[in-house]
Image (cartoon, rainbow, N blue to C red):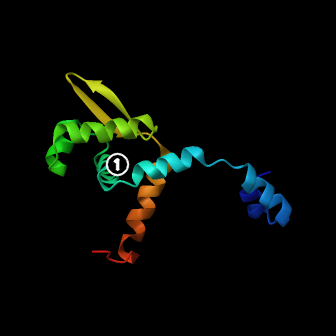
Amino acid sequence: MSVAAERETGDMPDKEELFREIKLKEFSKEAEILKALGHPIRLKIVYGLLKVGGCNVKNMQECLGLHQATVSQHLIHLKSRGIIDSTRQGLQMIYRVTNPLVKCIVDTIEEDDEDLPDLE
């Protein structure tokens, strides 16, 4: 039983069990996702894709005011991390967020946006 499941049932593990579970957890995939989302442009792309449900490069480029090559490089980065996927519709590639963890992260950021300090 995982620590989260034990918490739900009220059976809290002792510290040694908890430390053992933490030590065994890799977090490699999660760290890669967080690193990918750590770039403001990639975060904007993911946020936009979640809002519209899917989009092509041309529309993203126009929305962000960036060169097509720049947007494409960020899309390649997101796709290689398993955050987005693409499907062909005629001559266009439509990109969508496919990772449920990313949706949770963006939803949390959006909910907490008002509470974040202004760093500018």
Left or right: residue 23 versus residue 45 is right
Question: Which is nearer the eye, 98 or 14?
Answer: 14
Residue lying furthest top: 90
Please state if 76 lies on the left or on the right of 70 as rendered.
Answer: right
Rendered residue at 29%/52% (across/down)? 41
Q: In what quadrant of the picture does the C terminus appear?
A: bottom left
State the residue at coordinates (83%, 58%). Answer: 17
Q: What residue is shown with label 1?
A: 46
Q: Is residue 115 above or below residue 60?
A: below
At x 36% / y 78%, what residue is drawn? 117
Q: In the image, residue 33 lies at what x, y percent?
A: 48, 47
Q: Nearer the viewer, residue 10 or 108?
A: 108
In the picture shown, does residue 74 fall above or below 5? Answer: above
- Against 77, residue 38 (above or below) is below
Which quadrant of the structure image shows residue 118?
bottom left
What's the amino acid at mark 1? Val
Residue 38 in the image, given as x and y percentages of width and height: 40, 55
30 left or right, relative to 112: right
- Classify 10 Å Cα crowding around label 1: few (below 14), some (14-19), many (20 and above): many
In percent of width and height, residue 11 lies at 83, 64
The residue drawn where x is 21% and y is 44% is: 60
Q: Name the secondary structure under disc 1.
A: helix
Q: Is residue 5 visible?
A: yes
Residue 11 visible somewhere in the drawing? no
Q: Is residue 39 above or below residue 57?
A: below
Closer to us: 106 or 43 = 43
Using the rendered view, name the quadrant where residue 15 is placed. Answer: bottom right
Residue 76: x and y, percent?
Answer: 34, 35
